[in-house]
Amino acid sequence: MNDRYDFIATEEKWQQRWAEAEEFVVHEDSSRAHYYVLEMLPYPSGALHIGHVRNYSLGDSIARFKRMQGMNVLHPIGWDAFGLPAENAAIQRGIPPERWTLDNIATMKKQCQRMGWSYDWTRETATCSPEYYRWTQWFFVQMYKKGLAYLRKGAVNWCDQCQTVLANEQVINGCCWRDGSEVSERELEQWHFRITEYADQLLEDMDQLGDWPDKVRRMQKNWIGRSDGCAVSFPLEDGETAIDIFTTRVDTIFGATFLVLAPEHPLVIAGLDDSAVGRRMSEFVDEIRRQGKDSRTAEDTEKKGIFTGRYATNPFNGRKIPIWTANFVLMEYGTGAIMAVPAHDQRDFEFARKYHLPIQVVIQPEEGSLPPEPEQAFTEYGVLADSDDFSGLSSRTAQEKMVEFAQSQGFGEKRVTFRLRDWSVSRQRYWGTPIPMIHCPKCGTVPVPEQDLPVVLPRIESTELGGSPLANLPDFVNVPCPECQGEARRETDTMDTFVDSSWYFYRYTSAQFDSAPIQKEAVRCWFPVDLYIGGVEHAILHLIYMRFFTKVMRDLGLVQFDEPVGRLFTQGMVLKDGSAMSKSRGNVVSPDEVVQEYGADALRLFVLFAAPPERDLDWSDRGLEGCFRFLNRLWRMLEKVKDAKASTAAEGRELSEQDRALLRKFHQTVRKVTHDLERMHQNTAIAAIMELLNSVYEYLDGEDQGKAGLLREVLEGIALLLSPFAPHFCEEMWEILGHSDSITFTPWPTADLELAREEGVLIVIQVNGKVRSRFSASPGISRDDMQTLALEDEKTKSLIEGKTIRKVIVVPDKLVNIVVGS
RNA sequence: GCCGGAGUGGUGGAAUUUGGCAGACACACCAUCUUGAGGGGGUGGCGCUCGAAAGAGUGUGCGGGUUCGAAUCCCGCCUCCGGCACCA
């Protein structure tokens, strides 16, 4: 007898059988309930890491569970194959990025298969394949035609390390999200996606994200950053031009004692002439530019400004106020100009103090009043004062009335401003989807005609840093203009890889389709995604881009819904010794080595068991061994019963109390595991199966006549319940127990609630809320009986002797609480 | 500053959905059996304090509150973590 199972042979055997039987290949079938479980696609960096193993094992447990529940399950995978790291690695090794990437995909695919994840490999997709990026380009062209993709020259985030531009979402605390190096500002002409066009929808449709973590919703809300306010136009003394400002506190406008423009504001730039003021301003603007965006927007940065020499008129009261420019006003936000109300805004207050500008109180608190020269700004809502006809109104009412007034007078309007910026998608690198545009000196920017797509990324032996590498390939660059046939230049930037991954999960439904990006019927069959699993680090990158893309696709008539994902699950990271695994720290655990030593099933079990899926997991070699031991313990049990004759528990003999207890435990476990899988509590589901096995061992203890039948039934149940977590082991077990079919489509067991019900209940006796004693009773015992039994309990009696019973609380089948006074 | 989350044995965690025996399951540790040894396996113990034991007291970050009863609900505070932040 083998007291250890041969995981290497077992796992290989079943992986082979699954592949031969095309077990996980699915087809659209509208007659069946369907389920789409998706995990964030991996970047082919070289090898799977434990974080992937956790992510994909989580998804696989659900895919297998849903299959056994009879659903048609789509469980696909692909590769986020374009991107900088591949290009950098290729440069380092002197090989083409494509070879590097394809080799990595091959390696990682093998690793995936060795883990036994139930993917439909016929739908495998790599974003770097021309069949895929053809449609990424197609989307770009459609977006260009709709005005959603446009070229704009302006300040962009530049990462020196990556030698390319980054989107706002890819700048974290002023540093590159990928390598952490500091990001600087550059003026470049770049392609952008007009995601701001959808800002409101992205915000409003969050209601439709029923089962998304609040955390992600809040992060997106913060990121989109809607503020409701009012735009007001302040005329200049020339009477022709005016400065538009945006404010959320129009109720304070009578306290505006100056205006402040961003140093990049056109009016400031226009004033940089040869006059004395102009020269001083030039100096100032240069200084601010040198300061850089990052240090300039730090909160503790000293406020600096300079008077522009010009004045504007407050349209509400006709007062003439000076116009300043200062570092703390940003061109990107609002209109790049603010009205400064020092009495009611802390920043304006500090600035006014520093430059001796007037401070005018116009809002008084509900109770009491502010001193004429306050020590700090009063920024709360209150009651208006010294504001003409608006005096005496509450801030809230005043805001409404004042917007109406401004609107009627034609110098202002209600306005909504967002923090969200348009998505900069140009990248000055080689390994990405070529932007399908052509620049013609006569016709301007012209999209590549759809029938000419894809614009194939030329193969090159190696790339170099600096500039867009494609620009060095004359054969690629020089093309006739599609409109006038004259000489023209191809766009040589490539797209941000986040564009590629914004629609990959649609392609899975139509992976082989070659006349459109997606087949509408296939999408209709599978969407929305039922469950999407990935790390929370994408909360405001990928997860906002994919929502944006879906809305664009809807407006292109490709899909009929607003949101692509019904339920999002964000899993925690895998740590070792308290910190993220990384090569530089040298604390990386290799899945390959673990699989070699303990098997894929033990590894899968461990990553699911060791912590709740949404929390961070600390890697533990010992914990892994524990899971391995559990499988062996189950294996030994299997060896004990595998020869027993098949019979169901009901047959043969009357059920003993022991039999009923085991059967009860079994059905309770079925109920718990089912429930726990639905709510993504894989850790407690596995714990419940471990408990059940412990019960089986207890059951076997002592008298063992006539137990084989029930044992067998329970073991079969364990094989089914455990199979979403440890599929190879359970298939083997299933086969040993005499089944010739795969466990994959064997129906999930159902809990018999009758059998699961406890025969006796343990009633707790509390005295003044403290547990003092307990007794057992049959379920459904009457309240009166419970009370009587509790008061008759010897121990309870001695505790309440000589005391007055004030009250007795009876909770059916649970407890009796006797409240006594002295 | 604003918004949010989390604090439970030596460790990971369970019980929070529904207020009702706190510590399931596992790791580590201790004892013991099996084995030539190692490994593996079996059995028992394991929050803290007192106690040989039975048992008693105490205990879910801290302080209050609601309740017959609070890890769970409410208020205040502390610590850690995350998002946004000179956003007008």
Image (cartoon, helix red, strand yellow):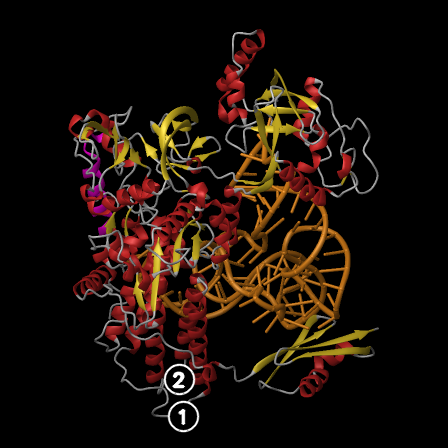
Q: Give the residue type at disc 2.
A: Glu
Label ID, residue A654: 1
**Residues in magenta?**
A93-110
Rendering quarter of residue A481: top left
- Which one is in front, A45 or A655? A45
Chain under label 1?
A
- Mark 2 highlights which residue? A703
Residue depth check, mark 1 versus mark 2: number of the one nearer the observer: 1
Q: Residue at x 50, y 31 (%)?
A: A332
Q: Residue at x 70, y 25 (%)?
A: A257
Find residue A484 and report its horizontal and vertical position in percent.
20, 31
Q: Residues within 10 Å of mark 2 (few under 14, many from 20)?
A: few
Rendering quarter of residue B39: bottom left
Q: Residues within 10 Å of mark 1 (few under 14, many from 20)?
A: few
Q: Answer left or right for A487 relative to A158.
A: left
On the same chain: label 1 and label 2? yes
Disc on the earlier residue, 1 or 2: 1
- Which one is in front, A804 or A481? A481
Question: Quadrant of the image for the N terminus of chain A?
Answer: bottom left
Q: Magenta includes A535?
A: no
Q: Give the residue type at disc 1.
A: Glu
Q: Residue at x 83, y 78 (%)?
A: A804
